[in-house]
Image (spheres, rainbow, N blue to C red):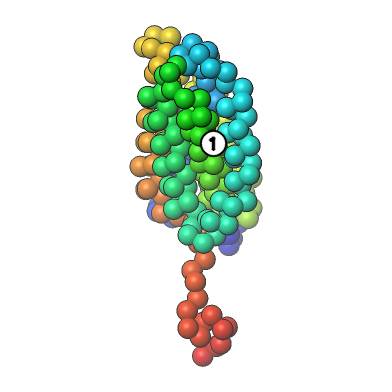
Amino acid sequence: VAQQSDRKLSKGEFRSLVFLMASIVLWFFGYNAITSKYTVYAQNVLDKDATTTLLLANVAAIISYLPVGLVASKIGRKKTILAGITMLFTAFFVGCFMTASSPSWLMTAMFILAGVAWATINVNSFPMVVEMCSGADVGKYTGYYYTASMAAQSLTPTVSGIFMDKVAMTSLFPYASIFVGLAFFTMLMVKHGDAKVEAKRGLEALDIDD
């Protein structure tokens, strides 16, 4: 990862870390708003049972952990995360238009997509944080990651609940979509922490020295 225990982040690395932390806060704000409030939303807006839907999202995420890690090793963590954010935004944006008359299979498909997207994001975001630090600083940077993620997870149920109570119950999916959409743009600004292995060409692929 990094080399020396006393290595300081460059300005570019620090900027990337700040934008990555912002991205983590934003996508947790979006995703955890849905997972914490969907049961109430499904009962009051969709008149559907939310239990199976949320379970399928979790199963889809678990199944996706290994494949998305392999994808990241081929195309890089940042591109993989951006693809995950795009999928998550798509799922939540579709949710904005779901009503009680919408087919149950569509909501199920949307949550499966969200589960795959969430795995795609999470498998790669924590390694990006750690990639920027030296071995001696892993604990500190792990703390940064969990502070950002846990703070967002703690706050978003309250904030999204206020919107649902004061604005409209149907504000849940637009709320989540906005935060996830913002995470795409902050993630674009991250320039470090990607450990993409470039493919060797020519004689390099044969490990032939000059």
- At which x and y percent is residue 118? 53, 39
Q: Please state if 27 lies on the left or on the right of 39 as rendered.
A: left
User: Residue at the location (47% across, 16% down)?
Assistant: 46
- Judged from the image, the secondary structure of the residue bearing numbered disc 1 is helix
Which of the pair 199/17 is nearer the observer?
199
- The quadrant in which residue 36 appears is top right
One can see residue 9 in this view: no
Q: Is residue 162 above or below residue 66?
A: above
| Residue 121 higher or lower than 163, as above or below | below
Left or right of residue 191: residue 74: right
Answer with left or right where residue 207 lies relative to residue 86.
Answer: right
Residue visible at 59% across and 52% down in the picture: 67
Q: Position of residue 116 (x, y in %)?
A: 54, 41
- The kind of residue on which mark 1 rests is Ile
Name the foreground residue: 136 vs 167.
Answer: 167
**Which quadrant holds the N terminus?**
bottom right
Is residue 207 something one can see in this rendering? yes
Left or right relative to 167: residue 107: right
Of the pair 169 and 126, the residue shown nearer to us: 169
How far across and down, in percent of the image, does residue 68 sit?
56, 51
Q: Please, which residue is most extreme toward the top here? A: 166
Residue occupying image coordinates x 51% and y 85%? 203
**x, y percent for residue 115:** 55, 37
Which residue in the structure is indicated by mark 1? 112
Q: Name the residue at the bottom extreme.
A: 210
Q: Residue at x 37, y 36 (%)?
A: 182
Q: Is residue 205 above or below residue 52?
A: below
